[in-house]
């Protein structure tokens, strides 16, 4: 009550104190609170568009605090009367923010997006002149003179081709897969589709084929998914949606380093995977199995896939195993479909066997 009285006194002060934005701090929120539930708590008061700012910690977990911006001084005064009222099963503390604190929070980006700095004038780079055929011949001839062998010609040709690709912008400067920025989703409705997941992250850039819905041992959706974003900033913005809803379900979001193997839109071919790992094309390695797993459990996990006779080998200490399939295609199909699925209550990872 003292807080409400103090806030009322502040409202009745000088007109200078009443200028600017009308913002309150709410503390003690349920961790399941959403923008909609906070807006409902203050109904029917006038909240500015996008004026509920839920606060998250560095791991994207709600802190139990938010800021709410109102459209008028009258709405602010009414909002302060909600101090110590209940949201869910929690008493919520409502406090007015002063002008200086409001400006400080706004500068930190905690009250909406920071204004974008003015764009500098566009600078059109001057491209170097293309290497002519005569220059290529001269470079090759110089190499022959320096090295005294046809090997110099080959080296010069490779160097010239590299320079040409660099000048034309065709030379890749990084491995796109190595810079993947991936968010794991948990708590999805079992009916969720890739389109619904993309809509959930509306406005953020997702890579082509970057939504991978997890499935259990029976091929049914597991309630989890991985989403690969185009940039780190998109992934960071996505974490701001932690604990928001798809349908009636709260969705939990976590950062992870990479998509599950074989989860991208274009399936990884067996030859590509074997070339990368040096493994056996028709065999997969399992990790994360229940320690009491038997060959029958592994057979049930790969139900519908043709396993070679005697192709199941379990690790001596449990938790991992090795499966050889009747063909390369069967192994690839199992990897793409069952990686990150469940065996019992354990999450199974699949890899090409090395």
Image (cartoon, grey):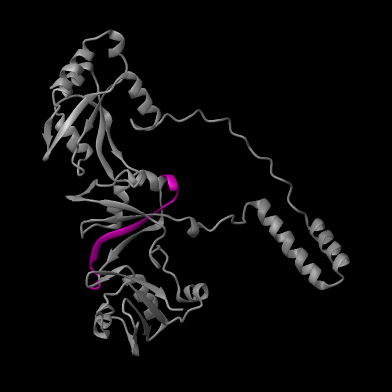
Magenta range: 217-233
Q: On screen, 258 above or below 199? A: below
Seen as rendered, the residue at the extreme top is 14
Q: Say if the magenta span includes residue 218.
A: yes
Question: Residue shown at 24%/45% (left/top)?
Answer: 244
Q: On screen, 150 above or below 184? A: below
- 40 vs 49, left or right, is left
Residue 171 figure quarter:
bottom right
Tally the numbered discs: 0
Which of the two residues, 25 or 71, is positioned nearer the viewer here? 25
Tell me residue 97's x, y (percent). 28, 23
Which of the two residues, 59 or 249, is positioned nearer the viewer here? 59
Q: Say if the magenta span includes residue 235.
A: no
Q: On screen, 94 above or below 327? A: above
Looking at the rendering, in which quadrant would you find the N terminus?
top left
Which of the two residues, 345 or 259, is positioned nearer the viewer here? 345
Tell me residue 107's x, y (percent). 40, 28
Tell me residue 145's x, y (percent). 88, 66
Q: On screen, 208 above or below 151? A: above
Which of the two residues, 126 or 349, is positioned nearer the viewer here? 349
Question: Residue shown at 24%/47% (left/top)?
Answer: 243
Seen as rendered, the residue at the extreme bottom is 309
């Amino acid at each position: 009550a003292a807080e409400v009285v103090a806030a009322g006194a502040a409202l009745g002060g000088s007109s200078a104190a009443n200028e600017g934005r009308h913002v309150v701090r709410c503390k003690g929120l349920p961790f399941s609170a959403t923008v909609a539930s906070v807006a409902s708590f203050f109904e029917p008061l006038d909240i500015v568009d996008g004026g509920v700012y839920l606060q998250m910690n560095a791991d994207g977990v709600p802190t139990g605090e938010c800021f709410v911006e109102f459209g008028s001084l009258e709405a602010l005064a009414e909002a302060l009367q909600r101090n110590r009222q209940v949201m869910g099963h929690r008493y919520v503390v409502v406090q007015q923010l002063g002008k200086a604190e409001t400006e400080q929070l706004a500068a930190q980006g905690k009250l909406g997006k920071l204004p974008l700095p003015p764009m500098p004038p566009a600078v059109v780079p001057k491209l170097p002149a293309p290497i002519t055929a005569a220059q290529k011949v001269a470079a090759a001839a110089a190499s022959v003179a320096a090295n005294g062998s046809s090997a110099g010609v080959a080296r010069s040709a490779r160097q010239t081709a590299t320079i040409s690709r660099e000048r034309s912008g065709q030379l890749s400067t990084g491995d796109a897969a190595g810079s993947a920025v991936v968010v794991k989703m948990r708590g999805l409705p079992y009916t969720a589709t890739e389109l619904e997941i993309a809509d959930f992250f509306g406005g953020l850039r997702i890579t082509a084929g970057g939504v991978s819905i997890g499935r259990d041992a029976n091929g049914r959706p597991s309630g989890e998914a991985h989403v690969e974003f185009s940039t780190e900033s998109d992934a960071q913005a996505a974490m701001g949606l932690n604990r928001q809803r798809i349908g009636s379900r709260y969705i939990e979001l976590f950062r992870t380093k990479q998509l599950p193997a074989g989860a991208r839109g274009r399936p990884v071919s067996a030859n590509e995977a074997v070339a990368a790992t040096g493994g056996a094309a028709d065999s997969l390695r399992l990790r994360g199995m229940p320690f009491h797993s038997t060959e029958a459990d592994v057979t049930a996990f790969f139900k519908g896939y043709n396993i070679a006779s005697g192709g199941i080998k379990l690790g001596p200490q449990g938790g991992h195993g090795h499966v050889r399939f009747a063909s390369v295609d069967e192994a690839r199909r199992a990897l793409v479909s069952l990686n990150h699925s469940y065996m019992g209550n354990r999450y199974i990872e699949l890899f090409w066997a090395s």
